[in-house]
Image (tube, rainbow, N blue to C red):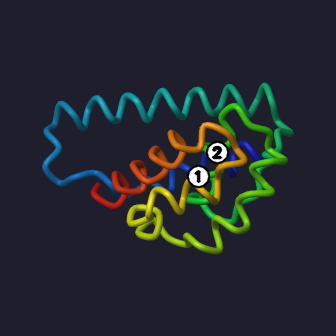
Amino acid sequence: GAFRTTFSSIASLFAGTRSPYYSSIMGAKLAKKEESAKAIYRILTKRYPNVTCELDFMDPLQLLVATVLSAQCTDKRVNAVTPALFKRYKKVEDFAGANLRELQSIIKSTGFYRAKAKNIKGLAMKIEKD
């Protein structure tokens, strides 16, 4: 279902981001978290088998950005803003290097645009770094 697609999309965005310097303790903690996430995923997909995502997106990055924009905003409004946003910013590097004022002007109608722009740029920088 859509939840499965959404979960898989977000998971694939972060795949391969682990540093080779993780200690065995951190690796064990991460493995436990992954195991817990998979258990939660199985429960949710069984309980809600026909979930759909109302946000329009083409890849995991777009889903992540649209999710940030959806805070305190309707999916309809987010879907009205994202075509122009995703035309201007296509890759993680584009969001990471974005001019905050320009990003804010594109997403202003979603509300809380200063915080959302800062968070979008910050998460892109984090993904790029890791």
Q: In this view, does 72 lie to the left or right of 80?
A: left
128 relative position to 117: left or right: left
Q: Residue 48 carries which label?
A: none
Which residue is rendered at x = 21% and y = 52% of the image? 19
Q: Residue at x 70, y 28 (%)?
A: 44
Name the residue: 64% across, 65% down: 85
The amino acid type of the residue labelled 2 equals Leu
Disc 2 residue crowd, few under 14, some 14–19, many 20+, Cα 10 Å? many
- CB atoms of marks 1 and 2 within 8 Å: yes
Which quarter shows the C terminus?
A: bottom left
- Find residue 29 and report its horizontal and vertical position in percent: 29, 29
Q: Mark 2 points at which residue?
A: 69
Q: Position of residue 9 (x, y in %)?
A: 60, 54
For residue 73, above or below residue 98: above
- Under circle 2, the secondary element is helix
How many marks overall? Answer: 2
| Front-lying residue, 85 or 108 | 108
42 lies above or below 67: above
Q: Position of residue 31 (x, y in %)?
A: 35, 35
Check disc 1: other Cα within 10 Å, few if <14, some if 14-19, many if 20+: many
Write the residue at 76% across / 50% down.
Answer: 55
Identity, as a three-letter code, of the amino acid under mark 1: Val
Q: Which of 69 and 17 is in front in this view?
A: 69
Determine whether, in the image, residue 15 is placed left or right of residue 86: left
Q: How far apart are marks 1 and 2 (CA)?
A: 6 Å
Residue with the mark numbered 1 = 65
Dividing the picture into quadrants, the one containing residue 75 is: top right
Local SS, label 1: helix
Which is more toward the observer, 53 or 80? Answer: 80
